[in-house]
Image (tube, rainbow, N blue to C red):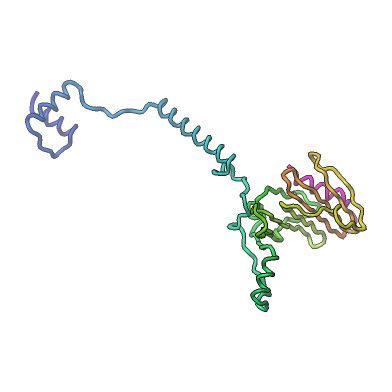
Amino acid sequence: MNNKRIQDAVHNHIGEGRVFSEREENELLTKIENNQTLRPKRRWFPELLGWGLAGAAILLLLGIIGSQTGILPFSADRQPERLDTSLLKEEEIHGLENMTEEERTHFLNRQPKAYQADTVEDALKALPFHLKLPKKLPFEAGFVVNQINDWHFESNTDGKDISVDFRATNDREVILIQALDFEQEFLGEGNQSESPLEDVVLNKGIPAELKIRDKEGEILFKTKEGTQITIVFIYQDDKYNTSKVLIDLANQMIE
């Protein structure tokens, strides 16, 4: 083998610019002649596919475990364990400047923390319970957020006790919806009013209480998840069937 083959081998397999001894050149030439040069290991498609499927299975398993334990969020629709105030703005309380420190402390301890949301979507995402608002209303309007209240006093330990109020109006008719995740007196409990109550059954067998007054109606029910919902419909036009409107709105909120 001539020197040119040795130099070509050195240039192609080791690197240009290095000076080799005669022994190194002979060893290199022997490896080339015996076809012993190292070749890069190739990863064939089946091997890559197998590793890819294994990785996907691990991610899926982690997602399922996280969705069940709350450690990892598997679904974007999952509600937070507590009210997510990062999506809200706390309302300022005015009129405290004329109170003494003791009066101010006593007053604040008896008031819930009130929040506002820029959008209905932010309000729904911030709640520690799932809530679906009606989309088909008896008049042209959309819902806005009235207020979100955190009733979590020191005596409570679950970090919930949240109420939220929504309103939709066309300046003549108004729909008010309140939802809360703690016990509150139902329409039929406590003091009885002059308006009679009617027991009705909503979708999926959910019981509700209906109260009809002049130009106004109210329905109250509790979802299977335990969220208590009150819908109030106030109107001026006699064309509305109050019971039908309220029952339809309530059924739209049941999933």
> What is the quadrant of the N terminus in the image?
top left
The question of residue 254 being in magenta is answered with: yes
Residue placed farthest to the bottom in the image? 98
Q: Is 139 on the left or on the right of 151, as rendered?
A: right
Position of residue 111 measured from the top left corner of the image (x, y, whole percent) = 70, 65
Q: Is residue 121 visible in this depiction of the protein?
A: no
Q: Is residue 118 visible in this depiction of the protein?
A: yes
Residue depicted at x 13% and y 40%? 17
- The segment highlighted magenta reads 238-255
* Labels in figure, total: 0
Foreground residue among 78 and 189: 189
From the image, give the main secondary structure of the stretch colored magenta. Answer: helix
Residue placed farthest to the left in the image? 22
Residue depicted at x 66% and y 63%? 113
Foreground residue among 77 and 221: 221
> What is the quadrant of the C terminus in the image?
top right
The question of residue 176 being in magenta is answered with: no
Foreground residue among 93 and 23: 93
Tell me the quarter of the picture where residue 97 sits.
bottom right
Position of residue 25 measured from the top left corner of the image (x, y, whole percent) = 10, 29
